[in-house]
Image (cartoon, grey):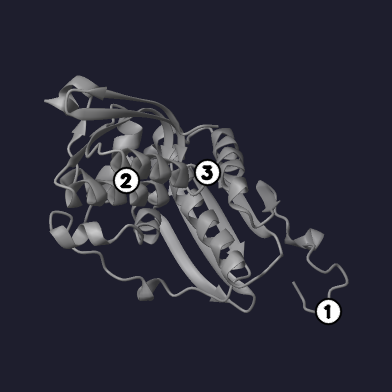
Amino acid sequence: MQIVTASHRDGQWTVVTVAGELDVVGGPDLRQAVMREVAQGNHHLVLDLTSVDFVDSFGLGVIVGALKRTRLLDGDLRLVVPEPRLRRVFEVCDLDRVFALHDDVAAARE
Amino acid sequence: MSPDSPAGDEMAVADFRPGEIVLEIPARTEYVSLVRVVVAAAAEIEPDMDSDRIEDLRVAVSEAATNAIEAHDLHGVSDRVRIQCNLADEEVAVVVHDQGMGFEPDEVPQLPEPDTPERLLHESGLGVHLMQMLADESEISATETGTDVRLVVYSSKRRRKGDALPEEI
């Protein structure tokens, strides 16, 4: 199953739509997708995790790595995580202090 | 299991307990999602386990299973990883047993504070933290043959009962 289902430019932001399970299997695919976007000059990314069913520490690590890559290039990374079940995993690891977690893409772009 | 058992890597029948589900998987990452599915489905059998707690269990067990598979891979162990799931009143206990070379949770480096720039240098190291935070009981112990990770998740109902206990009896 493809972990990144779509990607489109929206102003300065590139919205990457992610689906499925962000674990040791799906995580590397997201890492590759982020590296492709960054290599194409897209340094302001919104990761839309609305359709993600599961995230564990591997997936969180990939997202932290994505933030690091974009910020090194004066970009940024924002997250759309409307599902409380998924938010809880970020919160337990205090990553809600690293990322702002948004309810939808429009809020993430503001 | 005794070392002179004729059954090799098979468990003796006496190892099974009523209410226990045992799953043995090849030590390959593709099987982690299967572990999550089986453990979550087993937990749903326990009538008091609610969806939030089953989700916590899913994440915690996923961490343990991933670590076990990586331990086998790191040490070239071809044996299967064993997952035992025990249902009891208002709790589910899972033991993930690997045959890697052992694991010392105290050796996991502490992560910098989340809002410091140094935090972004660390893309791994959250697994043990997640297990400890999401499970009501978590124990990592080295055995003669590898590592056992024991995770126990209580139902929300049982947690509320615990909260209601008087502080001083």
Kindly identify the amino acid type of the residue bearing the numbered disc 1.
Asp
Q: Where is residue A3 shown, x and y percent of the image?
A: 46, 34
Q: CA distance from mark 1 to mark 2?
A: 47 Å
Q: CA distance from mark 3 to mark 1?
A: 36 Å
The answer to whether mark 3 and mark 2 are in CB contact below 8 A is no
Question: In the figure, residue B112 lies in which quadrant?
Answer: bottom left
- The residue closer to the viewer here, B22 or B158, is B22
Residue A66 in view here: yes
In the rendered picture of this protein, how many numbered marks are placed on residues? 3
Mark 3 or mark 1: which is in front?
1
Q: Where is residue A33 shown, x and y percent of the image?
A: 40, 39
User: What kind of element bears circle 1?
Assistant: loop
Question: In the figure, residue A90 lies in which quadrant?
Answer: top left
- The residue closer to the viewer here, B29 or B21, is B29
Q: Where is residue B160 shown, x and y percent of the image?
A: 32, 41
Whether marks 1 and 2 lie on the same chain? no
Q: Left or right: where does residue B66 sit relative to residue A48?
A: right
Please tell me the numbered disc located at residue B4: 1
Q: Left or right: where does residue B46 sit relative to residue B53?
A: right
- The residue closer to the viewer here, A49 or A69, is A69
Sequence-first disc among 3 and 1: 1
Q: Which residue is mark 2?
A: A63
